[in-house]
């Protein structure tokens, strides 16, 4: 049984499975498309919202350093992702990588983790997008009925029709084809980056040096030691990193880390890339470098425009311009945020459908969902299923308390990928690697340590919810996935054929 749980799917078999006509995806993406996808999914909620939250509650103007820390953690993971994506150009990202190195059960765990991460991330972003649209509609004097705009203040119940509609429209775009998705994303990303550059350039004229003092303030308060909302590291050691000025930068980094979530989605599109060995590493690293630069610049400008203690939690960029007497910028920024969150939502949905598709193609989930559309060559069944489910979740559920689950899921995936690089280097030294992670095993080990540190800075209740989801995953695997595994079926068929050939009766026949 132990061998069955940790059986690996070799790289050659993974690539061969992608060539089966009923499971083949269309290859249409270039390095530029992947970079645009990466920028499109990274620039969103983080840069428009989390800058204010992290600066006001923990890091002050030093939030710019928090973005650097989070960016470094992602860069370490990106180097590991780039090697895997260039060596194993198959849909599924960390799930596929771990299947080739760690075995079936670890692959299932990471795949199940990614399903939660990307689904929840999509729903959270859709709800955030709806909020910006409502703000724009209110400015124009248009109001939706309370029952169709999310939570009804009177009854506590409602359906966010805008959030649900966004998910369904994007689902339809993804079903039609990746190239159409890339074109839509290119236009939207161009608008979004232009708005971000306006914030940086225009805001620089309103920066006041006094707003940067103190640059690294002491935290005003820390959660009590017995509070599950406190960082796990506080419950473990009886103190919170936010109690100390410099350490508050790392606490804020665990918050703004959400701003970088999505660059790994580029790896899930490897199977749909024309030259994955060359273009996927470029797309991953290029998008991460661009976005980290923009994040640091925006955080420096915004905390210089307005005192960190006065920053808005919900709309820090827009309110910073209001504080300077230029409220018309707020409308422009709200528009850019709404446009930006559209691409984030679409690419997260794309990533989840590809992970689900890869798991079903391997038999760990029903293979009904692994068939591609005869015309568009997209995994339309899994895309439609997940799109409908996420639309319902986004319409009915307030997910603010669950957003940290996205962070912990992503960091967990980073750890698995880094470990997989080390293992595959030892087990398959002959494997062709168009991109090689430098200084192995130093870089992967640093990636593991950095990711684990940020995980420990997340609330303890997030760890509990994550553990519950993992337990559910184990139940699904042992009651369905293990017995339906395509790799397991192949092994059993090979064993049966071998036994038949060796039996005296079989020889006589």
Image (cartoon, helix red, strand yellow):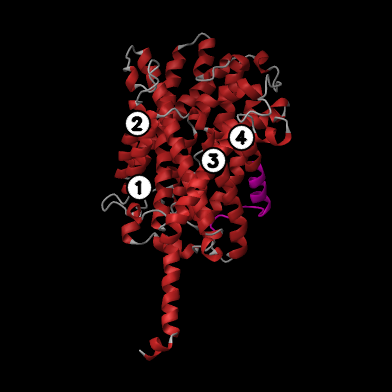
| Mark 1 crowd level (few <14, some 14–19, many ≥20, 10 Å Cα) | many
Alpha carbon separation for disc pair 2 and 4: 30 Å
Compare residues 305 and 12 and report the one nearer the observer. Answer: 12
Tell me where the magenta segment starts and ends, as one range: 433-450
The C terminus: image quadrant: bottom left
Name the front one of labels 2 and 4: 4
Residue holding disc 3: 466
Q: Earlier in the sequence, mark 2 or mark 4?
A: 2
Q: Report x, y in % for residue 412.
A: 57, 45
Label drawn at residue 460 = 4
Q: Report x, y in % for residue 182.
A: 37, 41
Alpha carbon separation for disc pair 4 and 3: 10 Å
Q: Report x, y in % for residue 15.
A: 43, 61
Find the residue positioned furthest to the bottom.
Answer: 508
> Is residue 5 placed above or below 266 in the rendered structure?
below
Residue holding disc 2: 164
Compare residues 377 and 414 and report the one nearer the observer. Answer: 414
Q: Earlier in the sequence, mark 1 or mark 2?
A: 2
Alpha carbon separation for disc pair 2 and 3: 25 Å
> Is residue 48 placed above or below 99 in the rendered structure?
above
Q: Quadrant of residue 226?
A: top right
Does 449 appear in magenta?
A: yes
Residue holding disc 1: 382
């Amino acid at each position: 049984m132990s061998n069955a749980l940790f059986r690996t799917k070799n790289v050659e078999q993974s690539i061969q499975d992608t060539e089966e006509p009923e499971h083949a995806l269309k290859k249409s993406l270039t390095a530029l498309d992947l970079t645009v996808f990466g920028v499109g999914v990274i620039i969103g909620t983080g840069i428009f919202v989390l800058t204010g939250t992290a600066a006001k509650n923990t890091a002050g103007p030093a939030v710019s350093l928090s973005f650097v820390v989070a960016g470094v953690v992602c860069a370490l993971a990106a180097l590991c992702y780039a090697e895997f994506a260039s060596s194993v150009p198959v849909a599924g990202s960390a799930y596929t990588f771990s299947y080739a190195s760690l075995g079936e059960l670890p692959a299932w765990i990471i795949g199940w983790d990614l399903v939660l991460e990307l689904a929840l991330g999509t729903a959270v972003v859709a709800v955030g997008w709806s909020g910006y649209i409502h703000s724009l509609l209110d400015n124009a004097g248009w109001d939706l009925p309370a029952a169709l705009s999310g939570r009804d203040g009177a009854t506590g119940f409602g359906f966010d029709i805008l959030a649900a509609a966004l998910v369904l429209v994007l689902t339809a775009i993804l079903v039609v084809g990746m190239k159409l998705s890339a074109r839509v994303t290119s236009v939207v990303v161009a608008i979004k980056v232009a708005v971000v550059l306006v914030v940086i350039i225009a805001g620089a004229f309103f920066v006041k040096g006094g707003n940067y003092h103190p640059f690294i303030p002491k935290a005003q308060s820390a959660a009590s030691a017995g509070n599950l909302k406190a960082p796990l590291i506080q419950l473990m050691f009886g103190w919170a990193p936010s109690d100390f000025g410099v350490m508050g930068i790392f606490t804020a980094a665990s918050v703004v880390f959400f701003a970088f979530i999505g660059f790994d989605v580029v790896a899930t599109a490897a199977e749909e890339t024309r030259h994955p060995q060359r273009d996927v590493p470029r797309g991953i690293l290029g998008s991460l470098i661009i976005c980290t630069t923009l994040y640091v610049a925006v955080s420096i400008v915004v905390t210089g425009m307005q005192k960190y203690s006065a920053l808005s939690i919900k709309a820090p960029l827009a309110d910073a311009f209001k504080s300077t007497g230029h409220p018309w910028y707020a409308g422009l920024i709200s528009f850019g945020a709404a446009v930006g969150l559209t691409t984030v939502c679409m690419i997260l949905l794309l990533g989840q459908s590809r992970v689900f598709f890869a798991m079903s193609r391997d038999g760990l989930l029903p293979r009904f969902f692994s068939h591609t559309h005869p015309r568009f060559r997209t995994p339309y069944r899994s895309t439609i299923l997940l799109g409908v489910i996420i639309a319902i979740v986004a319409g009915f559920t307030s997910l603010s308390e669950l957003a940290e689950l996205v962070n912990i899921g992503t960091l967990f995936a980073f750890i698995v990928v880094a470990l997989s690089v080390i293992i595959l280097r030892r087990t398959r030294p002959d494997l062709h690697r168009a991109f090689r992670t430098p200084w192995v095993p130093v870089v992967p080990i640093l990636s593991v340590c950095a990711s684990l540190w940020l995980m420990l800075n997340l609330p303890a209740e997030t760890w509990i919810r994550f553990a519950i989801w993992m337990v559910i995953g184990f139940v699904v695997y042992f009651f369905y996935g293990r017995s339906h595994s395509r790799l397991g079926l192949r092994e059993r068929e090979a064993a049966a054929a071998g036994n038949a050939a060796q039996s005296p009766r079989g020889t006589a026949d």
